[in-house]
Amino acid sequence: MEAFERNIRKVEPYVPGEQPRQRVVKLNTNENPYPPAPGVERALKELDTADFRLYPDPACSVLVDAIADFYKVGRDQVFVGVGSDDVLSLCFLTFFNSDKPILFPDITYSFYKVWAQLYRIPYECKRVDEQFRIVREDYYGENGGVIFPNPNAPTALYEDLELVEDILRHNRDVIVIVDEAYIDYAGPSAVELVDRYDNLIVTQTFSKSRSMAGMRIGYAIANPKLIRYLNDVKYSFNSYTLNRASLVCGAEAVKDRAYFEETVEKIKATRERAMERLGSLGFSCTRSSANFLFATHPDCDARELFEALKREGIYVRWWDSERIRQYMRITVGTDEEMEKLFAFLEQYLSKGE
């Protein structure tokens, strides 16, 4: 090791899903298969590129106002960032500064562990039960903060707000973050608890239900004091986080509630049909409340099937992780994309008979 390497911060990085360059059936990164709301395209065409010489609004007012109107919260209760990953990373940096470990599930979004290591935050992973459910009692003890997704990833399981509120009641002296990247495909949001719990932060994203993964827009909703703390860190780190196009297009996406609800329902309908179809092929799936399926087959090695699908140009997600090694995560695509998946699976399974 060179001497200077002793002072370099080293972490095991998050590994995102593959982004293949060739045309494939892409069911590996939970993107929305449908385009954004029509107003987004109009907004892009109307953008004055001469304004690109100017910095964007650091307060992100047009987008913050749109989100506040949509959720009927104060604009001082909304924080926006470059995707929910940026928002969550700033939350870790801002709120998790205790000597006590933060808590999150052992099967969950793998970026949590990366941020904890990057910012030198002690952490403990709490084991989900055999049905992959969060064990609420595991979050009752002394800690430096709590974070969990709802629905969880990659299991796709949604926990009722009763469980969320129970964890909040047992953690009044620390920050609790509920990561709701997939909430629009599930049940009620913890946003409705924000005014009752001043230590709650709810994060969401435009990458899934609003079809804007390429724009990188995420946001947090919390009480005004926590939002001020987040903005203080943001302005100390990078004042101009979101570009002009993202701000304008994001606001247009939020305004079109009808289109948003239509595409969400379309994906949910495809999800239910896909679960039935997978079941008829012998797969077992968790009860999905997201835009993806978490599936296993008793007669197929998940890694071998993952590689076979990839050779066929069908990309899904697989992790070499002890408790979920025999599962694949399959994004809900269009009906046409799902039919291509099922046609291959039928052929693949018939060879093993």
Image (cartoon, rainbow, N blue to C red):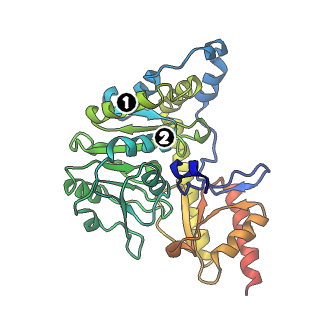
- Front residue of this view, candidates 72 and 232: 232
Percent coordinates x, y for residue 64 in the rendering:
42, 27
Tell me: residue 4, above or below residue 286. Answer: above
Q: Which residue is mark 2?
A: 86
- Front residue of this view, candidates 272 and 73: 73
Figure quadrant of the N terminus: bottom right
Q: CA distance from mark 2 to mark 1?
A: 13 Å
Q: Is residue 42 left or right of residue 64?
A: right
Label 2: which secondary element: helix
Q: Any mark on residue 324, and which?
A: none
Residue 276, quarter of picture: bottom right
Label 1: which secondary element: helix
Q: Is the Cβ of the residue at disc 2 closer than 8 Å to that at disc 1?
A: no
Q: Is residue 244 visible?
A: yes
Q: Is residue 64 left or right of residue 154?
A: left
Q: Is residue 9 visible?
A: no
Residue shown at 45%/48% (left/top)?
Answer: 184
Percent coordinates x, y for residue 346 in the rendering:
72, 74
Percent coordinates x, y for residue 282 in the rendering:
60, 79
Looking at the image, how many numbered discs can be counted on the residues?
Answer: 2
**Amino acid type shown at disc 2:** Asp
**Amino acid type shown at disc 1:** Asn
Q: Residues within 10 Å of mark 2 (few under 14, many from 20)?
A: some
Q: Which residue is mark 1?
A: 231
Residue shown at 39%/39% (left/top)?
Answer: 220
Residue furthest bottom in the image: 353
Decide which of tag 2 and tag 1 comes sooner along the chain: 2
Tell me: residue 61, above or below residue 226. Answer: above
Tell me: residue 105, above or below residue 204. Answer: below
